[in-house]
Image: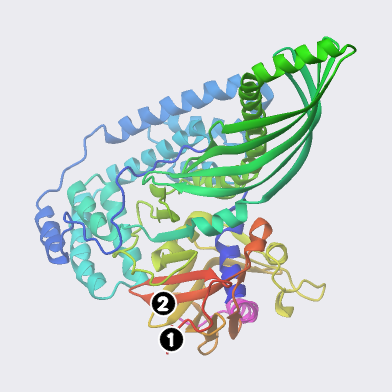
Amino acid sequence: MRCNTRIAVAFIFCLGYGFLDGAVGAAPPVAPGQKDASELSTASLVELAQAAKAEFRPLAADHASRAKTQLQRKIERLDRALQRSGAENARRWKEYLQWDDMRAELAKDEGPDTRQLGAIASKYYQEYGSLELPVFTQVRDELHAYLTALAVTGDAQLAENYQRHLDTLIEKLPQYDASPTTSLRQQIGQLLGWLEGAQQSPGLVSAVRQRHWKPNLYAEVSERLVSQGMGEAICRESDVEDCILGTAMFGRALLTGQTHVRFLDDSNAAHLQIVLTGTVNSTNVGYNRGVQIFSRGVTDVEAILPVSLTPTRFTADKATACCTTNSTIDDIAAKRRIIERIAWKKARRSKWQAEQIGSAHAEERIATTMDGQAVQVLAEARENYENKFCRPLLRRGEFPQDMRFETDKGFLRVVWRQAGAMQLAAPTVPPAVAGKHDVAVRVHESMVGNFSRAMIGGLTLTDKKLVEMLEKNKIEVPDALKLSDDKEPWAITFTANDPVNAVFTDNTLRFAIRGRRFKLGDRVVSKTLEMSAVYSLQKTPDGARLVRQGDVSVDYVDQRGQLSSEQVVVRTVMREKFDALFRPEFDTKGIALPGRWKKAGKLHLEHLATQDGWLSLAWLQAALAPADTGLARAD
């Protein structure tokens, strides 16, 4: 199962890789098991759709021109930003964005060529430069809005299409309520997107989404596990140079202690503290007007570095430290004994004050050190999050509108809804995860399709790129996928919508991958082909097992008539490739954590279930897991 999961992750995440300005939903999602009182039943939604049939609103005559004006304002803003970036940089950007062609299309009295303008708009969604910056995304969004306005205002049968879309929605909603299939979810999402684009029935659109737009991913990790990964034993020796009450101090200090992580209660962000507790033992020599003071110090230390995680940033506040120093003077040396006696008396009188000053200086040094280490540690996490998650989604206009981090005194949780204007999310809240766990993930099947659209929709995967991706994720490359001179190179261009689909039901998983264009050597087939496999899902004493049910299915979607010879060849080759990816069986015997978390040991699978389109998994540290979990295996 681990290999299968890695392959799925590789397909969905890695292909989309290449600052943060995404919209985050303000309203918290419904907690598991809690019903939103404002939800309407399916019957009420159907009644609302019936009533909406009498509420068609013709669009204003200047609807498209107003959208064009908004677009031109954003274009002018982008133009000013490009000019400020330097002449050569502006030239290169405008060449890539087909700036002159866009201006020419917008200047046409008869209106632009929407196909040409649409091709230009697609430039803003690519993995290029800094297209995630607001100055670019605002032009991209206004281009989309203008093209939508042109489409609806140019529709001579808008009123008739409105009625037809409502009739279809009235038909599909009860069907989806009875059997929430992927196909119905896609159809209803597209109907809502059309209504929204045509600026019709906003109340109906909102009501349907209230029912079928719940978060589709819930994940949580325990404070204990995070602390084991981020915590570490400290043993650090350093030089001491200080000045206390006019005495220049020199020596060596040894800090021994431990860091751990503490979660704070916050329902709007993940707030945690990296806490250092320890002791500093120092030996010092002080110099003051010919007097040498030999001393030892013991400083109790507690330092706290606050860290916060939100969907748009990872930040660390200034560290604070609390230190208490106790010092012992071992000897004082001077050229004359009377000076030594005076120095002893003065040292005893000022000991408390010197300890207070030493504690304050220690607090400043330790806090500064923690700040410097935090910059280094968080920089890598922030870079990975921004580069591998945020930027690709922002460039493609798919940053989640509802994503929330939260912490309490036991867990860090992520609640996430991935759904665009023409998509549905989860129709239900997830089932609860029973028992103790350190990591839990509950994912709805809509998340797989919606997120795959966001990350790889419309992108092209080559045989070489796939091998690189598998090797990077330390997955053995099957023979059928290995590159060689006697094999024709191949490539697949994924469908724009739901290129990867999953169905979770009755202890089975179905995975399907769809491509719209295939290249095999010199052959090119531009027809949607779906590669799918069905697996039974079983929990074993050691972990989990996926067993493929039957052969991998490879079929053209909505095929009519006889296949051409090229279509047959492409289908045959894709069956061979995906039969290697969708292996007959996958097993997992726990998860070995990487990097800093390796010392926590393996995670043992404690919970595994599929229910109502949700896949739920939970793991506990193997050292804490009982020998016999007592969990029933899936039939």
Gap between marks 1 and 2, in whole Å? 8 Å
Magenta stretch, main secondary structure class: helix
Q: Is residue 562 magenta?
A: yes
Image quadrant where one finds the C terminus: bottom left
Which residue is at 62% across, 19% downward? 353
Which residue is at 69% across, 67% downward? 470
Q: Is residue 154 magenta?
A: no
Position in image of residue 574 (x %, y %)? 61, 77
Three-letter amino acid code of the residue under disc 1: Ala
Q: Name the side, left or right, on which 422 lies relative to 264.
A: left
Q: Name the side, left or right, on which 117 lies relative to 56.
A: right
Q: Do labels 1 and 2 touch, CB within 8 Å?
A: yes
Which residue is at 78% across, 35% downward? 238
Crowding at label 1, few (<14), some or many (≥20) Cα neighbours within 10 Å? some
Position in image of residue 20 (x %, y %)? 50, 38
Three-letter amino acid code of the residue under disc 2: Ala
Image quadrant where one finds the N terminus: bottom right
Image vertical order of residue 594 relative to residue 291, above or below: below
Residue extent of the magenta highlight:
561-582
Position in image of residue 362 (x %, y %)? 66, 29
Mark 1 or mark 2: name the one nearer the start of the chain: 2
Which residue is at 58% across, 72% downward? 623
Crowding at label 2, few (<14), some or many (≥20) Cα neighbours within 10 Å? many
Which residue lies most toward the right here?
335
Position in image of residue 278 (x %, y %)? 64, 43
Q: Which residue is mark 1?
A: 634
Image vertical order of residue 301 relative to residue 341, above or below: below
Q: Which residue is mark 2?
A: 609
Asked if residue 131 can be seen in this view, the reply is: no
**In terms of depth relative to the viewer, which is nearer, 333 or 145?**
333
Report which quarter residue 557 is drawn in: bottom left
**In terms of depth relative to the viewer, which is nearer, 165 or 397?**
397
